[in-house]
Amino acid sequence: MKNILVAVDFEEKTKRLLVNARQIAEKFGAKIWIIHIAEHRSEYFGPTDTYQYGVQYVNLRHSIAEELRKEHKLVQDYANELIKEGIESEGLLIEGPTTKLILDEALKLKIDLIIIGSHKHSFLYNALIVSTSDSIIRKSQIPLLVIPI
């Protein structure tokens, strides 16, 4: 096992996923890839003609860009913490459909294990909405470690 992918969403339990990944990486000498998939918002990033789109559009665009910068910094901070502990690590922030991009990146990076968190939801929620972790479980060809959070 040489490559571990950890999908994070910046909730307070993210560190729990990283602790588990670090323990496994230490035992196998593996690299940890930390990935966060940002909500796809490219429809906001068209032309910036203030006269045509207005100041509100430009402000929204800047706000989204700032949020993405903050998320990217968080992913990099997680990777840097692991590097300080002697674990080879790299952080990725990608924008788009979550399940598809996690699985696509896992194949591209030759990932041996995907670590994801799973939230407990009500029966009604589960009946109406397919969670990201459930979708990855159903579609992944790569071994998974699902950690309840």
Image (cartoon, helix red, strand yellow):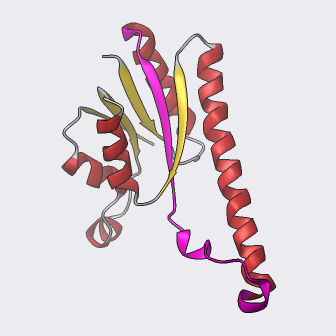
Q: Where residue 115 sits: x, y (%)?
A: 38, 34
Q: Where residue 20 sits: x, y (%)?
A: 45, 24
Q: Where residue 129 sits: x, y (%)?
A: 33, 68
Work out which quarter of the rendered image holds the N terminus and state it.
Answer: top left
Horizontal arrangement in the rendering, residue 103 relative to residue 52 (left or right)? left
Residue at figure coordinates x 32%, y 29% from the top left: 111
Q: Quadrant of residue 44?
A: bottom right
Number of marks drawn? 0
Residue at figure coordinates x 53%, y 14% from the top left: 87
Residue at figure coordinates x 32%, y 45% from the top left: 104
Residue 44 sits above or below residue 4 on the image: below
Residue 28 sits above or below residue 142 on the image: above
Horizontal arrangement in the rendering, residue 44 relative to residue 61 (left or right)? left
Magenta region includes residue 22: no
Q: Where residue 36 sits: x, y (%)?
A: 51, 46
Between 134 and 1, which is closer to the camera in this rendering? 1
Horizontal arrangement in the rendering, residue 111 relative to residue 69 (left or right)? left
Residue at figure coordinates x 40%, y 17% from the top left: 24
Residue 85 sits above or below residue 102 on the image: above
Residues rendered magenta in the picture: 28-53
Residue 81 sits above or below residue 121 on the image: above
Work out which quarter of the rendered image holds the C terminus and state it.
Answer: top left
Q: Residue furthest bottom?
A: 52
Magenta region includes residue 34: yes
Q: Quadrant of residue 43?
A: bottom right
Horizontal arrangement in the rendering, residue 139 relative to residue 5 (left or right)? left
